[in-house]
Image: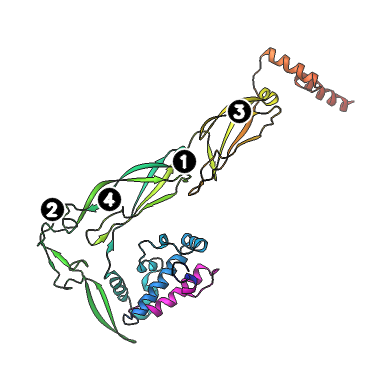
């Protein structure tokens, strides 16, 4: 592949039409085989394990798999990829406990936490936009609460440079090792040091601003581009604008769910906009010109003579912009012919003469006709 990545289906050894259960079963088998702790930290096995974990994380996710099948590998498939996360749906123990016991899981987590920064949690917020803003896109500034790096201690958690010391338990590694005998031999596992919580440092003089955490809760603002054609409920991702975990942590992401306010008289169907207009039966019969509201403002529409109820007038390229595209849908206007429920005496007479001229049965004449039919059957 152009990216230099092996095909994910090839990595797992499954076909492109494999079901999720088949992919999961294959991954479990390969994970048992290539996990680094099973292979005494062999570098080749560790790289192989990362490769199959990456492939599984994409192919087990319906949306990412569909994107991969359509466009191939792209960087956004694996932003902030963590091989440990692929076990979240069935639990690490399901894969390894049968061989190594429940304590082995902690060793895996610690092994893969070592040598890389931890990550702050993500934040989810909502932002509201109007119907027209969703059609054409808009820039908005959103405000939200987040854990941010403490500017007083620069995220270190200590009030001064000499306020920390190396943890005596783990000697600054953030991990402790233990050896366990199993039927296949000695297994060396690592776990997070409880004395320093994996930081490798003990804070003697905590920062008063953040209490030694290296971060504190504050209001933050970020400007976000809401793209044209956004749907109600769509989510936007702003990388690195989530919660911080201090100087040893990368920030999580900010996820923004877009809520689109309804616009009276307008409805979105796909990329088309649907509305309606009411006309009288005289306007339907004789035709007329009307002004209709559209996303682009008022627009003149022509009602042709003899227009029937339910007729649709289509304004080409007056609908929504296609999300992440440039083409626009149509604005479809349904014509409703309104029949009056109350008429003046003069209007009744005019309509009667109109009906008589077309030899149409109306009003009393209609009643007389049905009465004559009824009487004929009685004879």
Q: Residues within 10 Å of mark 1 (few under 14, many from 20)?
A: some
Would you name the residue on which mark 3 appears? Answer: 278
Q: Nearer the viewer, residue 273 or 198?
A: 273
Residue at the right extreme? 379
Q: Which mark sits nearer the N-terminus, 1 or 4?
A: 1
Q: Which mark is residue 146?
A: 4
Residue 215 is left or right of residue 300, and the answer is left
Would you name the residue on which mark 2 appears? Answer: 208
Split into 4 quadrants, where in the image is the C terminus? top right
Would you name the residue on which mark 1 appears? Answer: 136
Q: Residues within 10 Å of mark 2 (few under 14, many from 20)?
A: few
Residue 122 % position (x, y): 33, 55
Residue 51 % position (x, y): 40, 72
Residue ID at (80%, 19%): 357
Q: Is residue 238 visible?
A: yes
Tell me which secondary structure the magenta stretch mostly adopts: helix
Magenta-span inclusion, residue 9: no
Q: Quadrant of residue 98?
A: bottom left
Q: Is residue 261 visible?
A: no
Q: Quadrant of residue 166?
A: bottom left
Estimate the spatial distance between the alpha carbons at disc 1 and disc 4, rounded to whole Å: 30 Å
SS at mark 2 in the image: loop
Q: Residues within 10 Å of mark 4 (few under 14, many from 20)?
A: many
Q: Nearer the viewer, residue 74 or 166?
A: 74
Q: Which mark sits nearer the N-terminus, 1 or 2?
A: 1
Estimate the spatial distance between the alpha carbons at disc 3 and disc 4, rounded to whole Å: 51 Å
SS at mark 3 in the image: strand
Q: Which mark sits nearer the N-terminus, 3 or 1?
A: 1
- Range shown magenta: 10-37
Q: Are marks 2 and 3 in contact (CB under 8 Å)?
A: no
């Amino acid at each position: 592949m152009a990216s230099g990545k092996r095909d994910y289906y090839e990595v797992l050894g499954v076909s492109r039409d494999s079901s999720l259960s088949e992919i999961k079963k294959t991954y479990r088998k390969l994970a048992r085989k290539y996990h680094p702790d099973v292979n005494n930290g062999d570098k080749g096995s560790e790289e192989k394990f990362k490769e199959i974990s990456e492939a599984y994380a994409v192919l087990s996710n319906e949306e990412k798999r569909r994107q991969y099948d359509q466009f191939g590998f792209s960087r956004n498939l694996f932003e902030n990829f963590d091989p440990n996360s692929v076990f979240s749906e069935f639990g690490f123990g399901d894969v390894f406990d049968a061989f190594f016991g429940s304590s082995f899981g902690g060793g895996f987590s610690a092994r893969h936490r070592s040598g890389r920064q931890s990550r702050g949690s993500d934040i989810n917020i909502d932002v509201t936009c109007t119907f027209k803003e969703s059609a054409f896109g808009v820039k908005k500034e959103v405000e939200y609460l987040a854990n941010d790096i403490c500017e007083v201690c620069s995220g270190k958690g200590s009030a001064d440079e000499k306020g920390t010391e190396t943890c005596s338990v783990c000697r600054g590694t953030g991990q402790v090792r233990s050896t366990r005998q199993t039927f296949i031999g000695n297994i060396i596992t690592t776990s997070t040091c409880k004395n320093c919580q994996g930081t490798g440092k003990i804070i003697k003089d905590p920062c008063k601003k953040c209490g030694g955490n290296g971060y504190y809760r504050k209001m933050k603002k970020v400007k976000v581009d809401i793209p044209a054609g956004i749907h109600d409920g769509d989510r936007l991702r702003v990388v690195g604008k989530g919660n911080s975990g201090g100087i040893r942590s990368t920030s999580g992401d900010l996820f923004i769910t877009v809520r689109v306010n309804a616009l009276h008289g307008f409805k979105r169907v796909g990329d088309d906009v649907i509305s309606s207009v009411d006309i009288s039966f005289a306007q339907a019969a004789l035709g007329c010109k009307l002004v209709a509201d559209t996303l682009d403002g008022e627009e003149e529409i022509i009602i042709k003579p003899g227009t029937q109820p339910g007729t649709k007038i289509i304004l080409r390229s007056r609908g929504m912009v296609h999300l992440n595209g440039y083409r626009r849908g149509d604005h479809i206007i349904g014509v409703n012919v309104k029949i009056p429920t109350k008429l003046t005496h003069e209007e009744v007479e005019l309509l009667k003469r109109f009906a008589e001229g077309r030899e149409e049965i109306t009003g009393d004449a209609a009643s007389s006709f049905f009465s004559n039919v009824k009487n004929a059957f009685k004879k």
